[in-house]
Amino acid sequence: MSTGADRRLDCPSAQPEMAGARVLGVVERGPEGVRLAYAAGQVPVTAEVLDVAGAVPPTLVYRFAAPCAAERCTHFDGSRCRLAQRIVAGLDPAVDRLPACAIRPSCRWYAEQGAGACHRCPSVVTRMEEADPALMEIAGLPA
Ligand code: SF4
C-alpha cells in the first residue's frame, strides 16, 4: 500500500475553504447514525452549495475533499495520515462494500489504508462537535 508521500493526494475530510475543495458528499443522519451520501462526481464548492447549509456550519451538512495539507495538518506524521490509521483501527465498518466515491484514485485514506478506510468512511464526520465519543478519541480530541 502506498504511503502517498510522493504524490498529490486528497484529504476526504477537508474544510470547504481549502484550495481545491470539492463536495465529497452530503451527511445524512438516520437510525444507524451518520452515513455519507457520496457525490456522483467532482462538485465544486460554490456559494450556492454553502447557502444550503444556511446558518449551520457547512461541515455539519457536507464532507469536503481537498488536496492534503500534509505537514500543515496535525494528523500528518511526515508520510502518512494518522487519522486514517486511527479510523481503521478504532471504528467498526459502516458498510461492507466500497462506496461509489469520486475521489478514490486520489484519496489519501484509500491509498494508505485500502478498503478498510472506505468501509468506515461513510460514518466519519469532519465536524467533531457532534461525533460520538469513540470518534472523538480517534480524532485525538477530548470526549
Ligand atoms: S470512500 Fe474511500 S476513497 Fe472515498 S473518500 Fe472515503 S476513504 Fe477515500
Image (spheres, rainbow, N blue to C red):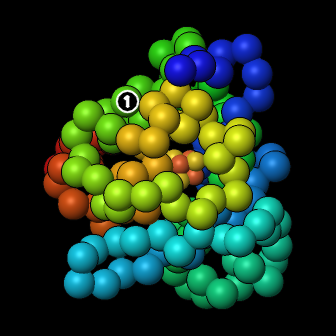
In this orientation, does residue 119 appear? yes
Q: Is residue 114 left or right of residue 106?
A: left
Label 1: few (<14), some (14–19) or many (≥20) C-alpha neighbours in 10 Å: some
Task: Decide if residue 71 is in sight here.
Answer: no
Q: In the shown orientation, is residue 31 left or right of residue 119?
A: left
Q: Is residue 75 above or below residue 51?
A: above
Residue 60 at x, y percent in the picture: 48, 72
Whole-percent x and y of residue 1? 53, 20
Q: Is 134 drawn above or below residue 107 in the view shown?
A: below
Q: Nearer the viewer, residue 79 or 136?
A: 79
Which residue is tagged 1?
85
In this rendering, the answer to whether 48 lies above or below 9 is below
x, y (%) of residue 39?
66, 71
Amino acid type of the residue that numbered disc 1 sits on in the rendered structure:
Gln
Q: Residue at x 48, y 16 (%)?
A: 77
Q: Residue at x 49, y 55 (%)?
A: 98
Residue occupying the point 59% across, 69% down: 38
The residue that appears at 23% across and 84% down in the rendered structure is 31
